[in-house]
Image (spheres, rainbow, N blue to C red):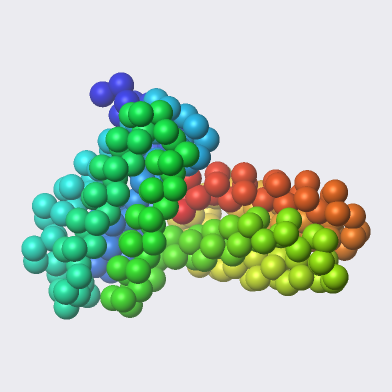
Amino acid sequence: MKAKRILMAALGWVSATVGFAADPVTDAINSAYVPYRAALFRTNSQAQAEAEGAISQASLAWQALISKYAKAPPPPYDRDRRFGQTLAEVAAIYQTASTEIRGQKLTAAHEILEKARDLMSDLRRRNNVVVYSDHMNAYHAAMEQLLDEGPKVMGQPQAFLLLMERVGALAFLTERLRSEASVDAASDPSFVAALKQVEQSLARLREAILSQDAASVLAAMGKIKGPYSLLFLKFG
């Protein structure tokens, strides 16, 4: 119970902000995704107690989903031969991550948990389901690519042009985060503020690139992930 209270306090437990789809399985996945997001965030921020609470809630929510839908999923998942297998793979990831968290290996747990996001995304994609998390995931993928490759290109010819290309992709995906938000989220002041922080971090990086100052670019690049993580935690 203590872990659950910690998790609920950390999240603000704002179920009203969760987007819902037209089928019960996707709705259940979206609901189970809330504590999963918290587990990702808390392992990344090295918060031991909160990570333990989050992974416990994520596992419970996912087991409930398996019990209800694994054997006989309704449309559009009823034709997916890998549906039950995918649910089991996500559950196994949660179990492995939970072990790593209990062993205070939060970085390893975070990397393991990232795989569950890919499995859920692929499950929706092959069943022609799109939810807001998919837009968040697209931004995340482009952001990680920038953070991984950006420092490597700094010494190359036309480095600033190459970085601006990445920023352009992120700017497009940021606009998707705004345009595809649910009515409830778009009218939530905390969503508006969080998305604004993402936009501002990207604008600062763009300004640094235009200045063609390598140190400023690297500093601005290092401040991209934080605002996204906060938006992801509550609305991703």
- Percent position of residue 75, x then y: 18, 74
Q: Residue at x 16, y 63 (%)?
A: 84
Q: Residue at x 48, y 61 (%)?
A: 137
Q: Which of the pair 39/231 is nearer the observer?
A: 39
Residue 68 placement, left or right of 95: left
Residue 140 picture quarter: bottom right
Q: Residue at x 11, y 52 (%)?
A: 67
Residue 70 picture quarter: bottom left
Q: Which of the pair 49/18 is nearer the observer?
A: 49
- Percent position of residue 103, x then y: 35, 29
- Count all numbered tags in the image, as a single digit: 0
Figure check: 131 above or below 148? below
Q: What is the residue that sits farthest to the left in this orientation?
A: 71
User: On the rendered image, what quadrant is the N terminus found in?
Assistant: top left
Q: What is the residue that sits farthest to the top in this orientation?
A: 2
Is residue 178 at all visible to an observer of this figure? no
Is residue 121 at all visible to an observer of this figure? yes
Q: Residue at x 72, y 52 (%)?
A: 221
Residue 235 placement, left or right of 226: left
Figure check: 59 above or below 48? below
- Percent position of residue 164, x then y: 77, 68
Residue 104 placement, left or right of 227: left
- Percent position of residue 17, x then y: 42, 50
